[in-house]
């Protein structure tokens, strides 16, 4: 077998059995208005649309959101977001429990909301997202660029 075919076969096998399930990971600031739909003005009920939105403070929408999608299906109990805040030497843990199964390819928005996160100019310095299974074990994780290597 030629070297090219061998390399191609190895590449195909490694991608077929890939366990990387977090598609992308990014952080953005969203004001409350970003989540308002016209129907909410009439009935007062927030419509998530094609997104799953879970907030650290359910009473507030404005804040910094870590967004991602899953490319593999897992039985997830909750998401753990470890965040370095400005001036902090240790990360703060935030737990986000989904109300239902997370479909593959559906955008997930984990919102750091509430009084502490209202300032657009004070985003998280670094963060690590972990997918926690029903048994309490970490299924997968991803980090922001500034988190560094573990």
Image: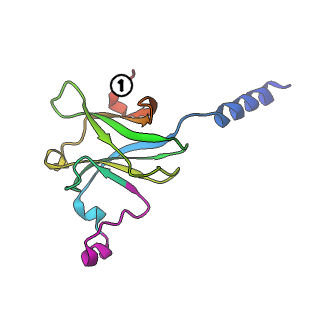
What residue range appears in magenta?
Answer: 37-52
Label 1: few (<14), some (14–19) or many (≥20) C-alpha neighbours in 10 Å: few
Residue found farthest to the front: 135
- Horizontal side, residue 4 vs residue 68: left or right: right
The residue indicated by pointer 1 is 148
* Figure coloring: rainbow
Write the residue at 30% across / 39% down: 95
Q: Quadrant of the N terminus?
A: top right
- Horizontal side, residue 125 vs residue 23: left or right: left
**Count of numbered tags:** 1
- Horizontal side, residue 78 vs residue 89: left or right: right
Q: In the figure, residue 20 lies in which quadrant?
A: top right
Q: In the rendered image of this protein, does residue 2 appear above or below residue 60? A: above
Q: In the rendered image of this protein, does residue 120 appear above or below residue 32? A: above
Q: Position of residue 22 (x, y in %)?
A: 48, 40
Q: Nearer the viewer, residue 80 or 133?
A: 133
Q: In the figure, residue 128 lies in which quadrant?
A: top left
The reply to whether the magenta stretch includes residue 15 is no
Q: Position of residue 60 (x, y in %)?
A: 20, 55
Does dot 1 land on a helix, a strand or a loop? loop
Q: Quadrant of the C terminus?
A: top left
The reply to whether the magenta stretch includes residue 46 is yes
Q: Position of residue 144 (x, y in %)?
A: 36, 35
Write the residue at 27% across / 38% down: 94
Write the residue at 52% across / 39% down: 21
- Horizontal side, residue 99 vs residue 86: left or right: right
Q: Nearer the viewer, residue 135 or 35?
A: 135
Q: Nearer the viewer, residue 106 or 58?
A: 58
Q: Position of residue 102 (x, y in %)?
A: 47, 49
Q: In the figure, residue 25 lies in which quadrant?
A: top left
Write the residue at 38% across / 51% down: 99
């Amino acid at each position: 077998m030629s070297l090219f075919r061998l390399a191609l076969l190895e590449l195909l096998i490694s991608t077929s059995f890939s366990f990387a399930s977090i598609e992308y990971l990014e952080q953005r600031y969203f004001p409350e208005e970003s989540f308002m739909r016209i129907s909410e003005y009439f009935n007062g009920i927030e419509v998530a649309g094609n997104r799953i939105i879970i907030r650290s403070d359910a009473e507030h929408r404005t804040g910094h959101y870590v967004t991602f999608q899953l490319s593999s299906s897992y039985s997830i109990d909750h998401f753990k977001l470890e965040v370095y805040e400005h001036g902090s030497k240790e990360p703060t843990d935030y737990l986000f429990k989904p109300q239902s199964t997370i479909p593959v390819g559906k955008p997930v928005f984990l919102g750091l909301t509430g009084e502490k996160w209202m300032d657009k100019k004070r985003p998280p310095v670094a963060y690590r997202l972990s997918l926690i299974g029903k048994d309490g074990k970490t299924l997968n994780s991803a980090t922001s660029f500034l988190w560094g290597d573990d």
